[in-house]
Amino acid sequence: MLVIAHRGASFDEPENTLPAFERAIAMGADYVEFDVWPDLTVTHDRPRRGAVYPSLAEVIDLCRDRIGVMVELKRPRGDVVERALRLLDDDAVLVCFQRRALEQSRALRPKIRTVQHVGFGVSIKAAASAWAAGFYDDRVTARGLARARSYGLLTTVYTVNDEARMLELRDLGVDGLFTDRPDRALQALGRRPAG
């Protein structure tokens, strides 16, 4: 099961920051996931004038050849998808709630894998052309996971911090967990955290 550090190791360091990503790398997570806005800044909430955020380019440079990246696009309008894709390596993963942005990314860069979050108005069937479906933890069911698999999708669940729940999801065959606690996930899954 993939351990995806949600906004970095965001329990230990401020989310969506370079220290949070460094910490996730040190722990041995498989991926870092982070939020990217139309101005290509990395932050969960809408960027505020005068605040300092890392840029997508900075995060990619930090992570390259050290950890996989999952880039969640927030409000991807206009040429945002195209501009973001210019910075990503072929092994990056693009994550979005908005199906149109993922379709655009596949048209521009077919090798880029995509995670379509489902629920909240997006059906599992609508995610069928993605690499993986992302389920919100409170809404994931064995039936939903089986349906996603029937479309050839890998399955991911967000955001899981409880070790017992991690093991339940593992036993259901989930392929990846988004977690604020990659250290706990690695330990629960029998993979010793590095740092």
Image (tube, helix red, strand yellow):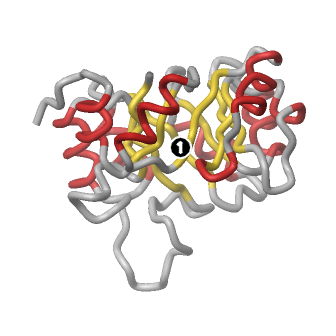
Where residue 117 appears, as percent x and y from the top left, is: 70, 44
Report the residue at 62% width, 41% height from top. 95
Q: Is residue 27 left or right of residue 35?
A: left
Where residue 69 appears, as percent x and y from the top left, is: 44, 35
Q: Quadrant of residue 28?
A: top left
Q: Quadrant of residue 107?
A: top right
Q: Is residue 109 left or right of residue 195?
A: right
Q: State which quarter of the image contains the N terminus.
A: top left
Mark 1 residue element: strand
Q: State which quarter of the image contains the C terminus.
A: top left
Report the residue at 65% width, 18% height from top. 111
Q: Residue furthest left?
A: 195
Identify whether 163 is placed above or below 91: below
Q: Amino acid at mark 1?
A: Val
Tally of numbered tags: 1
Where residue 110 appears, as percent x and y from the top left, is: 72, 20
Front-most of residues 52 and 115: 115
Front-most of residues 24 and 62: 24
Residue of label 1? 71
Report the residue at 34% width, 74% height from top. 52
Q: Quadrant of residue 126?
A: top right
Dot 1, crowdedness within 10 Å: few (<14), some or many (≥20)? many
Q: Is residue 190 left or right of residue 88?
A: left
Report the residue at 63% width, 49% height from top. 136
